[in-house]
Image: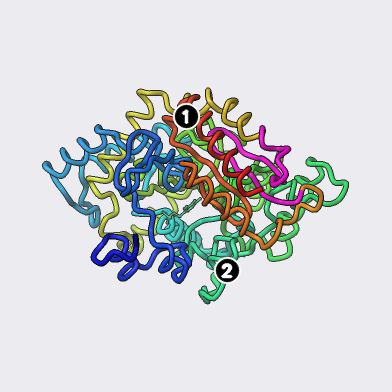
Amino acid sequence: MNQIPNSLHASDIAHSIHPYTNARAHEAQGPLIITRGDGVRVYDSEGKEYIEGLAGLWSVAVGFSEPRLRDAAIAQLDALPYYHSFAHKANEPAIRLAEKLAEITPEGLNRAFFTNSGSEANDTVIKMVWFLNNALGRPQKKKFLARTKGYHGITIASGSLTGLPANHKDFDLPAIPVTHLTCPHFWKFGAEGETEAEFTARLLEELEQTILAEGPETIAAFIGEPCMGAGGVITPPEGYWPGVAAICAKHDILLVSDEVINGFGRLGTPFGCQKYGFTPDIMVTSKQLTSSYMPLAAIMVNDKVYDAIADHTARLGTFGHGYTASGHPVACAVGLENLKIIEERDLMGNAARLEPAFQAGLRAFADHPLVGEVRGTGLIGGLELADKATKQPIGKSGALAARVARAAQEAGLICRNVYDTVALCPPLIVTEEDIAQIFARLGAALDQVA
Ligand code: PLP
């Protein structure tokens, strides 16, 4: 197919550079071109149907054919297609969306700053935190704590927060001050004979000792995803997050909850921090905020963060940061309508209601010979393919998960292989019948590869 001159496939091979893709392999195999969406399903250029088991990139809450989002975008394009938010300018959808986010996010997160992507949002968080600590007269308090396997984006600064090898290898990211702590994955990193409670205690001790060794006066913030996504769907051990929150509070370290995947019902609670019992100072959201119909991210901050920044802008005369499309009216209008749909159709409730069926379906693969660990919560889950006894990858790391994802695609299920884990994160509109089909197709793929 990719040999046909002037075909879309040939053109893609000739002219595109794809993110997260082996370019030479792509030249040989060509793209999967998705041309149409319908609910939780998408269709390729040959008309083949797939269940989108990862909601695009963990992001399309309302499915791939929601007319109300199209209508919201068109109405806003008609009324005012673009305006910016610099220097006291504003537009109605951005105002309304900030107000809505302040209403639905946890207590205290009262203000929103908009960016276009999660990576830009986390870059902005770093700059806000640095700005704030300069404002408070503690210029040495600048370091970030993050975790190995955490994912916070790929720009130079957010990529430095990310703790995954592919995002660092050969990119020469300048060393912004980040310390990566142990990934809170009990199955993988628990020591021989250690209980889950002991593992939690060890990680909290590591956190406290790191802070004391580096000096609390040098550590500005701790950032983490409540449930890690791109690192392999890693749910934290019992007690981990309240413990992290308490240690951060004790040492005056800001707690940043990166909810780019977790936010808006993914874990069966409105926000991931609510699932695990902590309240952040800063929360980062994106993806399901607009169901990714438009690029948009929102950083929510509490009054303590806002007031320190606001006072400093008064001294300096400005907050010298912002994007041309910060608070883009079309993206914000789509976000508002998307949140309205999530509310009206109780899609967060749907995630909570379907959690037992989804998690049981996943756990049915626990005894499969290729599966080392099954994990997940709400409507997100992953199968780590590994030797059950050694917990090590079977064969070359990542290769088996890639084969299973390819076989799943042939069987009509799009999922994502992240390192050794096959990840699922269906749209929040998914039904019990869809879930049954997802697992039937995934099972066929696993059996084919086994
Ligand atoms: N933070 C988390 C938790 C993410 O999962 C992602 C993307 O997957 C990002 C940040 C970066 O978002 P973006 O790809 O929009 O830059």
The colour scheme applied to this rendered structure is rainbow
- Where on the picture, by quarter, is residue 369? top right
Circle 1 residue: 434
Query: Residue 18: percent from the left, percent from the top?
Result: 39, 64
Q: Residue at x 23, y 38 (%)?
A: 70
Name the secondary structure under disc 1. Answer: helix
- Give the class, few, some or many, for how many residues have Cα within 10 Å of label 1's Cα (few <14, many ≥20): some
Question: Can residue 350 be found in the magenta stretch?
Answer: no
Circle 2 residue: 177
* Marked residue nearer the N-terminal end (1 or 2): 2
Query: Type of residue at label 2?
Result: Pro
- Give the class, few, some or many, for how many residues have Cα within 10 Å of label 2's Cα (few <14, many ≥20): some
In the image, taking residue 140 as reference, residue 292 lies left or right, namely left
Query: Residue 351: percent from the left, percent from the top?
Result: 50, 29
Q: Residue furthest right?
A: 193
Q: Nearer the viewer, residue 428 or 223?
A: 428
Q: Nearer the viewer, residue 102 or 48?
A: 48
In the image, taking residue 342 as reference, residue 167 lies left or right, namely right
* Residue range (magenta): 364-387
